[in-house]
Image (cartoon, rainbow, N blue to C red):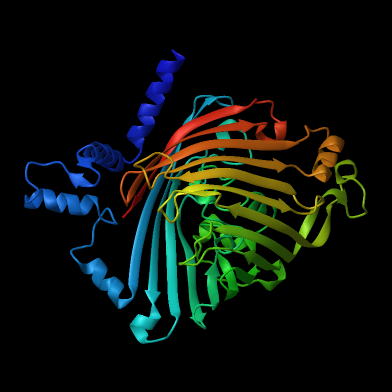
Amino acid sequence: MGAAWHYRFILNNFKKMKKIISSAIVFLLVADCAFAQGEIVSPSKTNTFFQQIGSWWNGQYFFGDWAGKRKELSEKGIDITSTYVVDLLTNVHGGIRKNRFRYDSSLGLDVNADLERIYGLKGLQFHVSGVYREGKNLAGDIGNRFPPSSIYGSEEIRLYNLYLEQEMFSDKLSFKIGRLGTGDDFAQSPLYWIFLTNSIDGCPINLPINFFFTVYPTATWGARLKFQPANAFVWKGGIYNEDADIGRMSAHGADFSIRRNKGILFIQEFGFVPNQYESAEGLPGNYKLGLFYSTGRFKDLYQDENGNSYALTGLSQKRRYGNYGFYLHLDQMLYREPGTKDQGFTPFFVAVWQPERINEIPLFFDLGLTYKGLIPGRDCDIAGIGLAYGRWSRQLNKYHSDAGAEKQTFETIVEATYKIAINKWLYFQPDIQYIINPNGGNQNTGNALVTGARIGITF
């Protein structure tokens, strides 16, 4: 009965989802079988209808070139891109509520205007983006801290980026100012994006958990300076407003207030990036050290205003000024397929540390292995295995002990995923995750196994 109920539950949820999208995916997957290495299997390649279908299928976008208008706009300096991503996940074992099926979706729109082409303003660009999200978080059914889906959060229509970027001195120096996401420029790597779990995808998840470190789809007023004096060396520095209230759901990302008394985040990153330039013959790597300091006020996780346990005295938590930390990111391609530029094996590692007394997850690290083009003939597919580990604050556990609550120790996520590039604008990504010690082990839910897939379309 359990298996039958599970099947009916999933089926009903699919019916509640995007019927048009589901039908389109089925059509596209079936249509893929009709193509051999990008060519249409048809009696006559001169058939106009099949040529049009082949041109669409092998193009860059689901909606094509808009009868030439998209190319025309791009040549004038305006590029418009929209993406739709949906995660379909279920916990087949473990969790507070077992055998739950959840989906999250994210529809994004990005517009970039090259003001050099439009108005002759050399090196200046204007960017604006927004997002519409919906769905539910499977972590609520499992009871863990790090969501299995990275596209969960801010289920609404929301403005994201709104900024100007100026490039100077042959792109060795660039300056960005406006509404920015800190995680777009700092503590990030394209290697993280391969994974579904929010503990890896995006940036190390303890940063936005511990303080107001803005990540997609929340932006704040800020500025970022990037300086790359040589091919292998890069420095970035940023300053961001730390008012968490601007990220509230009711504002839809359009609260443009600047409340200076909420604090300011200063962050800088030093990078050694060997063999990243176009003509490099060696294997590329990324070695980054980031340092950050927030001037905001933070609650002590154990002490009251007199330095005693606030769990025992009942007094207000002690306020501490300033929060800081550092992160280290390492990745290095170790093997490249002969005759290719980016196919091969690349491991990565990232670690973050912050003070125990004011940060819920003071120690966090990710590590992973990725391989692009692992299967012969599937040059654009990407395979990945990742592990994320977050440890709870010992100061917080001292509070839990005094309050008679269960302690939280650590949570670990292990993920295996394979991104299948069906064509240039459509991918299908089966995924499996194993969640160890959910929520630090304080809910007695046991480890959980999550299976599912991600589907992505570029419109």
Residue extending farthest to the bottom is 120
Of residues 404 and 114, the one nearer the viewer is: 114
* Residue 155, above or below 441: below
Q: Is residue 58 left or right of residue 254?
A: left
Q: Is residue 341 visible?
A: yes
Q: In which quarter of the image is the C terminus?
A: bottom left
Residue 182 sits in which quadrant?
A: bottom right
Q: In which quarter of the image is the N terminus?
A: top left
- State the image coordinates of residue 231 (x, y, percent, origin top left): 56, 71
Q: Is residue 148 left or right of residue 7?
A: right
Q: In this view, does 344 lie to the left or right of 262?
A: left
Residue 110 sits in which quadrant?
A: bottom left
* Total numbered circles: 0
Q: Is residue 165 left or right of residue 109?
A: right
Of residues 203 and 332, the one nearer the viewer is: 332
Residue extending farthest to the top is 1
* Residue 336, above or below 224: above
Q: Is residue 213 visible?
A: no
- At 75% from the left and 42% from the top, the residue drawn is 392
- State the image coordinates of residue 238 (x, y, percent, origin top left): 63, 71
- State the image coordinates of residue 428 (x, y, percent, origin top left): 37, 41
- At 63% from the left and 65% from the top, the residue drawn is 271
- State the image coordinates of residue 223 (x, y, percent, origin top left): 59, 74
* Residue 33, above or below 232: above
